[in-house]
Structure formats: structure tokens, C-alpha cells
């Protein structure tokens, strides 16, 4: 439909119909529904009548094509102007084929992998009748106590930005062709803004930072997603500078729409409009509605402040109907952009051919490859890994047999489709005895005794342990980043057997690995690998895949060290290795300043050498491009992928600058003995940073460049 026609359609709508378009409901409220939908927030009594649901504009959390068709058919029978519903859901790391959690995808340092994950997700989700995904979540996170860290790609603004754009590209393809490419869907970047900075990692907690910090570290990934064309933005639950994001005119009008140029649909998070009342900046739902409308929130998800108040407020002049028209127009444009006015079923009605896309062997293969590439080898004493396929293995622990390996936000994935570690290893190793445990939170003495019995007969013990999937994700913050306590007795008992121990860790967040790292001869960070978990683990342990993941987030030494992140400031009293005796420096007296494992850390089964460092000049001006190149050689016996990263240090700025900032990275695949020249280009723009007055400019001065695999193993160019 042409924009002019949309304007004419808007002109035919009553105020009641306009206000209805601003409401988003779960499937349960619609005729034809098959499921309740995905309930991801509080469910208050909403007073939704059939008349209201016949006016509502969108659905969140529908599950299948059959359900979408049934709801859409029933809806269009009664909707006076034939304006179709648009169906949205959280397809965050897969629809039915579940990929590794986004934090694991961040560990791949492979933006093509992220784009592939999103493209497969969109292919399956659109076959299931969805047209919008509430993804990517690009909140920067420095606190692993926060459960939704699993949904992020970690602590770095540049890495997050690269992934944000690649997720959007994978979901949407060419945004201009969304109306005809039914295998693509609209992306919704979230949560605007800075939700990942919840104080103390406590879910939904206060966020408070300088505006300069917001711009410097927390906004870049949203900007990258918008520049990639994300069609929607979702508001954050938290305040920004004391004002709830969902009612924050400065954040949503001045920054998001005016400064960043976003003219798409802004949707509230679940209940976030009404929660403005809880924040204490609205006395009632009318004030909450007014603040959200002024802020430019177009869709109210699962609360009815708009529905209850806007008609009356327009009638008595306390709400400007032009703001409602603006919101409705953006919603109509979104529906038009995904082709719903041409085909409200996007090619699915009366056809089942697309269903074969779902959980196809090809999709499983993609998930398996990305899951293996996301795994990070944290320890491998004496090259214990990889294991020969005829090694006599005792596979023990609470994650040995379970299919609870999909991770949070995998709501339409079925655990029954998942490959357990045991299933995967039994296919690649000839002698695997297994002794599992029923519950990660409560490993019993009897289960430990059986694990020890099996372990005593083995050459190598593979200990599969970690968190359950519901120990991270939304509303699952923890105060102490350790394993469930009952697992430590198991670790001790297994260590006491005296055989080599390979630990495979399943977790949705960085953890304090003390008590585990010492008991492991090798440790593989597996995260939550998704549907193909067991095959990916076996691929790594058997050496079919050479581990190549790098941590996208620091692993704290202990909870008390949080927040700990690599791009920290120097402080006025940095610890100076040359003067280790100086007491009055920025340090703890009981633990080191360094995290247990640094951002960017990850081992390999091979080794790489960096030589022939070259830089095109040691001075650049505004018009120059600086070229930095290095030769990377695989000096080992097996092929391997290597992440080559370029970090920058601005030695003197108008504000204190981080000791290192990631500026570029590239992942290369090298055969044994193969060498590759990796080249990066920097310009003056890469030297810019935010000043206290928010000018984004560079200063003349000296800089250090570091190039290498991780923070320590880097060459330094002054
Ligand atoms: C949840 C989450 C948000 C999700 C939405 C819909 O509360 O905060 O990320 O997209 O509700 O499920």
C-alpha cells in the first residue's frame, strides 16, 4: 500500500480504532487462539473485552502458523477497516532450532555466524507466522549477577555494535524488500536504554550513570542496530537519569528520534507504560499514558493505560490527537513494510511447504557449527584435549544426560529436540560410561557415589556441570556468581578419584570458577549451546573442531570484584608492577585486580605466531587512513581459527580514557603452517570520544596500538 493510501486509511479511522492499534496483547485475548502465548511478565487483570481485542493492533507471543492464521482470520472478519494484526515474539537465539545463547554467539567473535543465526531464526519464525522478533537485545553488560547477561554479547561497545548490526541484517535482509521477502522479519532492538547497567545486577533495578558514559559505552550498539535498519525499538524498564525510559521525552524524542533519526515503531516493554506509576513519576494511568505518548511510545505491551485514557484525554483536550495519529501511522507503515496489507498471512494460508524449514538438518548443522565455535577453551594442561575417540571415558555430572541445554529465551525450542552431551559423545567416542544427576541445584550423595564408581574405571573423566537454564535469563539475577553449592562436593569427589578431569561448563553468565578451575585439567566454557549441544561438545572434545571462542566478557575473580571489565580507566593510583610494594594504590588487599579470565581470552589446540608488524605511518591527520598489518602463522599441527584484535589507548584526553579499547577484530581460519596477513584501517574518526559537553571529537596526541589474540598476548605499537 502506498504511504498516501495509509494516510487515507488513517483518516477513516475513529479515535477508538486508532487507540486500539496502540495496544498489544498475548494470543489468549483473541478469537481463534490456540495457546496462551509466551507470558514473560506480570499478568494483572486487564479487563479486555471481545470488542477491545477486535480493535487491538498487534499480538505478542503467538507460536505457530496455524495459530496466526486462525487469529488473523477471526480478527479480519470483525475489523471494520480490514487492518491486519501484526504478530511479534521473542525469537532471540532461534525459533525451533535453538542456537547458543547470545553471550555464546558473542564468544565466536564472528559476525557472520550471528547473521547466519538470525537468518535461520527468521526463516523458521516466519514459517510459524511471526513477522517481528523482539531481538537483538544489545544492552551492554558488566555485571554477571544480572540474569539477562546471557542475552547480551558482553561488555564491549565495539563488539556489541558489530553483533547488533549483524543480527539485524540476518533477521531483516534488505529492509526495503521486507514486504515481499516472506522469509525475513522485522527486528526490534532492545532495551532502550542501558537496561544492562541495573545496579548490583539486580533485575529491573535502578540505572544511573553520566550522560557521557551513556553515550560513550551504552548507546553505540543501539545506534549500530538502527544504522542497520532495525524497524522497531523496545523501551527499557529502568529509569535513565531518574526518568523512566518509557516516559522519557529526552531519551525517546530528543535522542532516539531527533538525534539518531529513528522513525520506526517504538514499543514499550511488557507493562512498562503502567510501571511509570511504580517508578513514582506518574500518579495514575492517565499520567502514565500521557508521558509515554509524549515520549513517542507507539505500542503499549500488555497494559491498558492508552486504552483506558486516550479517548477521553483527546476528547477533553489533555492529549493531542496528532500524537496518536503519528503513532498509528508508524504502526500502519510497519504492517505495510512487512507486506501485511497485500497478504495478512505472508504466504502461509493454505500452504504447509514452509514448515519443512523448521528444524531442518541444514539448520541443525548451522547451530552445531556455531555452538562449537562459541565454546571457549579456558584450560588444557599438557594438551589433555583433544581426546582420542577410543579413550575410556567416564561422563559424569548433572549436565551429562540432560537435554536442558537450550538456555533462557528459547521458549519455542523443545528440549526433546536437543542433543545431550551423552548422546553427542556416544556418537563420536567408543567407550563412554555415564553417571548423571537429576538436578543441578541438588546433586545427591548417591549420585556422586555412582559418578565416582564409574570414574574409577575410566582413563579420563568428563565432568559436565553448571547452571540450569532457568538460573539466568529475565528475572533470574543471582547475588553470588558461583555454581549451585551442592556441585562443589561432587567436584571434590571427582577430583579425588585421581584421574585427568575435563570439565565442560554450562552457564548463562560469567561465574567465579574457583573450586572448579583447580580441579580441572581441562575446562571448556560451553555456555548454553542450544539444540545441537551434545554434538558440539563432542566435536570439541574429539578435536573435530579446534576451540576458537574468545570471552566476550571478563570472568570475575569473585563476586566482590564486580564490575570488572577490560576497558577500565587508569585511576590516579594505578597498580604499578614496578613498584609492587606501594600500598596506597587502587587495589584490593585480598584479591588481585585482574579478573580470573580476561575479556578476549581463549585457548586453542594449535599455536599462532604474530610477525611482520607494519604501520603505514606514526602520524595521522583528519584526512589520513592508518593501515596496520600483521602476519599471523599457524605454527601448530592442526587447523585453527584465530581472532586477531586491534586495541587502542588514547594516552591523554579531555576526560580519562580507557587503558584499552577494542577498535577492530577479524577471525581467520588457518591450516597448519599457513600464514595470513591481517590488515586493519583506522581513521581519525576512530579516535573520537565524548567530551563532558557531549561533543564527539578527537584530540591531537599520542596513542598506543595493540594487536594480537587477546589483551595480554599483544604487540604494542606506539
Ligand atoms: C519481557 C522482556 C522483553 C521481551 C518482552 C516480550 O519482559 O523484557 O525483552 O521482549 O517482555 O516478551
Image (cartoon, rainbow, N blue to C red):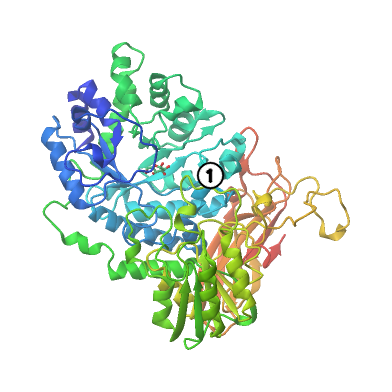
Task: From the image, tell me which residue sits under label 1.
Answer: 196
Number of marks: 1
Looking at the image, which residue is at 33% across and 51% down? 172
Question: Would residue 675 be seen by someone viewing this image from the given angle?
Answer: no
Task: Determine whether the beta carbon of the residue marked 1 sits less than 8 angstroms from the nearest atom of ligand 1.
Answer: no
In-image side of 478 versus 587 (left or right):
left
Picture coordinates of residue 53 (x, y %)?
22, 32
| Residue under the point 39% across and 59% down | 115
Residue furthest out toward the top: 316
Q: Position of residue 351 (x, y in %)?
A: 13, 56
Secondary-structure class at tag 1: helix
| Residue 56 or residue 675, whichever sits in front | 56
Which image quadrant shows ligand 1?
top left
- Residue in the picture at 58% in, 83% down: 636
Q: Position of residue 663 (x, y in %)?
A: 58, 55
- Residue placed most toward the observer, 596 or 138: 596
Q: Nearer the viewer, residue 692 or 327?
A: 327
- Residue 560 drawn above or below residue 209: below
Is residue 351 visible in the rendered image? The answer is yes
Amino acid at each position: 500500500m502506498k504511504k498516501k493510501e495509509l494516510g487515507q486509511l488513517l483518516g477513516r479511522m475513529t479515535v477508538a480504532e486508532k487507540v486500539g492499534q496502540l495496544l498489544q496483547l498475548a494470543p489468549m485475548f483473541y478469537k481463534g487462539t490456540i495457546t496462551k502465548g509466551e507470558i514473560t511478565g506480570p499478568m494483572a487483570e486487564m479487563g479486555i473485552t471481545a470488542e477491545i481485542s477486535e480493535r487491538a493492533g498487534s499480538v505478542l507471543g503467538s507460536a505457530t502458523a496455524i495459530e496466526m492464521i486462525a487469529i488473523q482470520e477471526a480478527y479480519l472478519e470483525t475489523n471494520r477497516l480490514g487492518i491486519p494484526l501484526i504478530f511479534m515474539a521473542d525469537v532471540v537465539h532461534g525459533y525451533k532450532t535453538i542456537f547458543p545463547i547470545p553471550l555464546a554467539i558473542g564468544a565466536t567473535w564472528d559476525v557472520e555466524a550471528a547473521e547466519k543465526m538470525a537468518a535461520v531464526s527468521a526463516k523458521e519464525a516466519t514459517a510459524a507466522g511471526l513477522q517481528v522478533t523482539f531481538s537483538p537485545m544489545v544492552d551492554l553488560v558488566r555485571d554477571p549477577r544480572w540474569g539477562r547477561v546471557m542475552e547480551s554479547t558482553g561488555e564491549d561497545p565495539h563488539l556489541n555494535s558489530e553483533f547488533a548490526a549483524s543480527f539485524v541484517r540476518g533477521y531483516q535482509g534488505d529492509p526495503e524488500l521486507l514486504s515481499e521477502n516472506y522469509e525475513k522479519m522485522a527486528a526490534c532492538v532492545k532495551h532502550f536504554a542501558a537496561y544492562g547497567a541495573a545496579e548490583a545486577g539486580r533485575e529491573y533495578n535502578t540505572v544511573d550513570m553520566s550522560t557521557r558514559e551513556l553515550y560513550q559505552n551504552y548507546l553505540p550498539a543501539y545506534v549500530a542496530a538502527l544504522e542497520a535498519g532495525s524497524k522497531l525499538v523496545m523501551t527499557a524498564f529502568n529509569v535513565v537519569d531518574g526518568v523512566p525510559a518509557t516516559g522519557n521525552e529526552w531519551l525517546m524524542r530528543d535522542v532516539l528520534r531527533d538525534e539518531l533519526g529513528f522513525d520506526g515503531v517504538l514499543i514499550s516493554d511488557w507493562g512498562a507504560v503502567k510501571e511509570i506509576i511504580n517508578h513514582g513519576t506518574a500518579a495514575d494511568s492517565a499520567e502514565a499514558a500521557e508521558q509515554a505518548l509524549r515520549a513517542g511510545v507507539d505500542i503499549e505491551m500488555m497494559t491498558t493505560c492508552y486504552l483506558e485514557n486516550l479517548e477521553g484525554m483527546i476528547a477533553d483536550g489533555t492529549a493531542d490527537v496528532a500524537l496518536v495519529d503519528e503513532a498509528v501511522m508508524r504502526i500502519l507503515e510497519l504492517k505495510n513494510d512487512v507486506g501485511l496489507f497485500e497478504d495478512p498471512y505472508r504466504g502461509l494460508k493454505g500452504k504447509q511447504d514452509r514448515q519443512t524449514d523448521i528444524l531442518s538438518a541444514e539448520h541443525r548443522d548451522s547451530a552445531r557449527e556455531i555452538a562449537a565455535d562459541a565454546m571457549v577453551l579456558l584450560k588444557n594442561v599438557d594438551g589433555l584435549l583433544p581426546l582420542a575417540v577410543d579413550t575410556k571415558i567416564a561422563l559424569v555430572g548433572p549436565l551429562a544426560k540432560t537435554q536442558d541445554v537450550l538456555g533462557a529465551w528459547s521458549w519455542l525450542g523443545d528440549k526433546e529436540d536437543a542433543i545431550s552431551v551423552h548422546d553427542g559423545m556416544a556418537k563420536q567416542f567408543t567407550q563412554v560410561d555415564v553417571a548423571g544427576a537429576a538436578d543441578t541445584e541438588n546433586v545427591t550423595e548417591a549420585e556422586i557415589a555412582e559418578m565416582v564408581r564409574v570414574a574409577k574405571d575410566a582413563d579420563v573423566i568428563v565432568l559436565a556441570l553448571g547452571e540450569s537454564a532457568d538460573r539466568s535469563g529475565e528475572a533470574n539475577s543471582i547475588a553470588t556468581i558461583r555454581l549451585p553449592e551442592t556441585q562443589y562436593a561432587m567436584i571434590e569427589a571427582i577430583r579425588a578419584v585421581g584421574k585427568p578431569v575435563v570439565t565442560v561448563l554450562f552457564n548463562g553468565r560469567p561465574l567465579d570458577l574457583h573450586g572448579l578451575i583447580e580441579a580441572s585439567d581441562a575446562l571448556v566454557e560451553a555456555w548454553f549451546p542450544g539444540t545441537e549441544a551434545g554434538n558440539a561438545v563432542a566435536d570439541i572434545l574429539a578435536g573435530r573442531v579446534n576451540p576458537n571462542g574468545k570471552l566476550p566478557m571478563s570472568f570475575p575473580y569473585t563476586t566482590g570484584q564486580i564490575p570488572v571489565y577490560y576497558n577500565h580507566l587508569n585511576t590516579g593510583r594505578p597498580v604499578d608492577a614496578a613498584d609492587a610494594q606501594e600500598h596506597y594504590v587502587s587495589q584490593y588487599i585480598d584479591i588481585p585486580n585482574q579478573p580470573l579470565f580476561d575479556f578476549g581470552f581463549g585457548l586453542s589446540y594449535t599455536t599462532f605466531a604474530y610477525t611482520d608488524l607494519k604501520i603505514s605511518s606514526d602520524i595521522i591527520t583528519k584526512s589520513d587512513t592508518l593501515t596496520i598489518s600483521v602476519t599471523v602463522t599457524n605454527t601448530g599441527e592442526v587447523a585453527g581459527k584465530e581472532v586477531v584484535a586491534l586495541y587502542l589507548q588514547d594516552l591523554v584526553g579531555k576526560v580519562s580514557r580507557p587503558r584499552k579499547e577494542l577498535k577492530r577484530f577479524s577471525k581467520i581460519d588457518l591450516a597448519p603452517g599457513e600464514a595470513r596477513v591481517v590488515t586493519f584501517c583506522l581513521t581519525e574518526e576512530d579516535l573520537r570520544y565524548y567530551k563532558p559537553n557531549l561533543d564527539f571529537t578527537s584530540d591531537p596526541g599520542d596513542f598506543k596500538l595493540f594487536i594480537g589474540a587477546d589483551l595480554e598476548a599483544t604487540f604494542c605499537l606506539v
